[in-house]
Image (cartoon, helix red, strand yellow):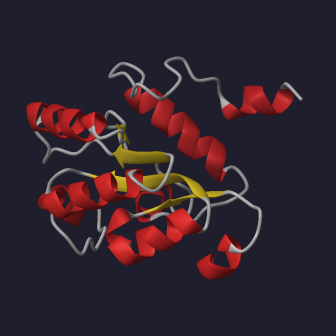
Amino acid sequence: MLEGIAERSVNIGFQTRIDLWDEESLDLLGRANCISMECGIESITESGRDELNKNCRMGTDRISELLIYAKQRIHWVQANLILTDHDNKEDIRKWQENLKTHGVWVSDPVPMFPFPGSPLYVQLFGQPDDDAWERAHRYYTRTFSDKGYSDIQEQNPAAIEDLECAR
């Protein structure tokens, strides 16, 4: 598929996990005009990734290597982190600084959002219904409003219901 995309005049961007790629496939992504790659790293520790059931196939050092390699081929490479109890804030800061010196953008850790249908959503609310997104958003904003959000999140998010009525 990527070889076919490379033959066309189109740019692509997507969300993925970096541990699903290797140098050869990242080279192919670059040739396929990939301009943006957002990678869910979730945690800088293996125990943090295990807690989030990521089934990650590599350690943090290898993840860092691949993110840097990807950035040499893809204009925008982003690493996203989830707030876990396994990550030391100073270790996160050092990891972020290292990657940022190589041009990889790294988010501050964000709280886990209970996406409808995800294991966390089902654990909290049961099976999704017509109000699932609104329920998940209310839970998230109420739970984390006093703890602050990451540097990439709106600090005073509007309710989904208010946004829907704005149309």
Q: Nearer the viewer, residue 82 or 144?
A: 82
**For the view shown, which residue lies furthest in the right direction?**
167
Q: Residue at x 32, y 33 (%)?
A: 108
x and y percentages locating residue 30 in the rendered image: 52, 63
x and y percentages locating residue 43 in the rendered image: 24, 51
Q: Is residue 147 above or below residue 136?
A: above
- Give the left or right position of residue 144, taking residue 138 as reference: left
x and y percentages locating residue 54 in the rendered image: 31, 68
Q: Residue at x 65, y 42 (%)?
A: 134
Q: Is residue 1 visible?
A: no
Quarter of the picture containing the C terminus is top right
Q: Nearer the viewer, residue 9 or 159?
A: 9
Quarter of the picture containing the N terminus is bottom right
Q: Residue at x 24, y 75 (%)?
A: 57
- Give the left or right position of residue 52, taking residue 35 as reference: left
Q: Is residue 120 visible?
A: yes
- Give the left or right position of residue 166, taking residue 19 as reference: right
x and y percentages locating residue 18 in the rendered image: 36, 64
Q: Is residue 98 above or below residue 27?
A: above
Q: Residue at x 23, y 58 (%)?
A: 65
Q: Nearer the viewer, residue 77 or 27?
A: 27
Q: Nearer the viewer, residue 80 or 8?
A: 8
Residue 127: quarter of image: bottom right
- Give the left or right position of residue 132, taking residue 51 as reference: right
